[in-house]
Amino acid sequence: MSQWHRDLNEVAVETEKLLATVAAMNDLSVQEPAVLPGWTRGHVLAHIEGNADGLARLARYLIDGVERPMYSSREARNADVTLHASWSAVAHLEAIAESAAQLDRDMRGVKETAIDQTVILGAVLQVTASRLAPQRLLEVSVHHSDLGIPSYTWRDWPSRLAEYFIPIVVADFREGGAFPVDWIETDGIRLEILEGDGSGVRGDSREMLAWMLGRADGAGLEPDGITSVPTAPPWR
């Protein structure tokens, strides 16, 4: 089995976990605050649904060659999230299940000869199509934990998430030139971020990614050359 299909299978597993969480929610809990500032859980669920719709449009472009933007505009995407945030728990469950199923069908229809093509995530980020399945895994897993429900936190993220995205996040911070430590080390591998006094942070890969994405304070990580693990700046 190819990595493309392994990633799709992992997305399916994480999606089922998300759907189980949403199925246990009621209309009141949907409107409670999420972990993300200013968002309710309904906003998070609406974003997850919209992300599936957007990625499906990119997958269909890879199938038939007809160009479709992921979103018509950032404003339209944000407006849809706001509009759908107030839906009932059942409506969110049905929308996420339907959009995820359509995305899975479209992604599985992409020929592996097409995954080296360039697509545009959001409005400006150019990546190879092979990034689409891991990107959906990121959206489902991270935003599942953003619901702030104890049954699923960053500790429950699949290991594939850290394996794939830590190098990407490091490269982005390296390019941006602003990060509170010079390097990180996880699974015995050190990744340089900045040139400086040599301070760094080491530890478990899942917690490292959660810290770098602002979803954990890094309490379980080990600082080196500094007295404590600092707060990571926003990623994108």
Image (tube, rainbow, N blue to C red):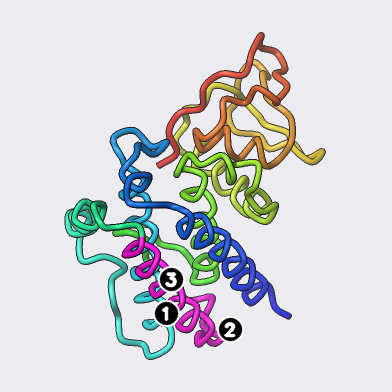
Q: Residue at x 49, y 71 (%)?
A: 129
| Closer to the camera in the image, 118 or 32 | 32
Residue that sits furthest to the right in the current view: 188
With respect to residue 51, does 86 lie above or below? above
- Amino acid at pointer 2: Glu
Q: Residue at x 65, y 22 (%)?
A: 219
Q: Earlier in the sequence, mark 3 or mark 1?
A: 3
Residue that sits furthest to the bottom in the current view: 64
Q: Secondary structure at mark 3?
A: helix
The image's mark for residue 102 is: 1
| Residue 180 position by quadrant | top right
With respect to residue 62, does 27 lie above or below? above
Left or right of 96 in this view: 20: right
Taken as a whole, is the magenta stretch helix, strand or loop? helix
| Quadrant location of the C terminus in the rendered image | top left
Report the residue marked by disc 3: 97
- Amino acid at pointer 3: Ala
- Amino acid at pointer 1: Gln
Q: Earlier in the sequence, mark 2 or mark 3?
A: 3
With respect to residue 152, does 79 lie above or below? below
Write down the region rendered in magenta: 90-119
Left or right of 111 in this view: 50: left
Q: Nearer the viewer, mark 1 or mark 2?
A: 1
Report the residue marked by disc 2: 112
The answer for how far apart the CA atoms under marks 2 and 3 are is 25 Å
Left or right of 222 in this view: 171: left
Q: Residues within 10 Å of mark 1 (few under 14, many from 20)?
A: some
Residue 199 among those drawn in magenta = no
| Residue 57 position by quadrant | bottom left
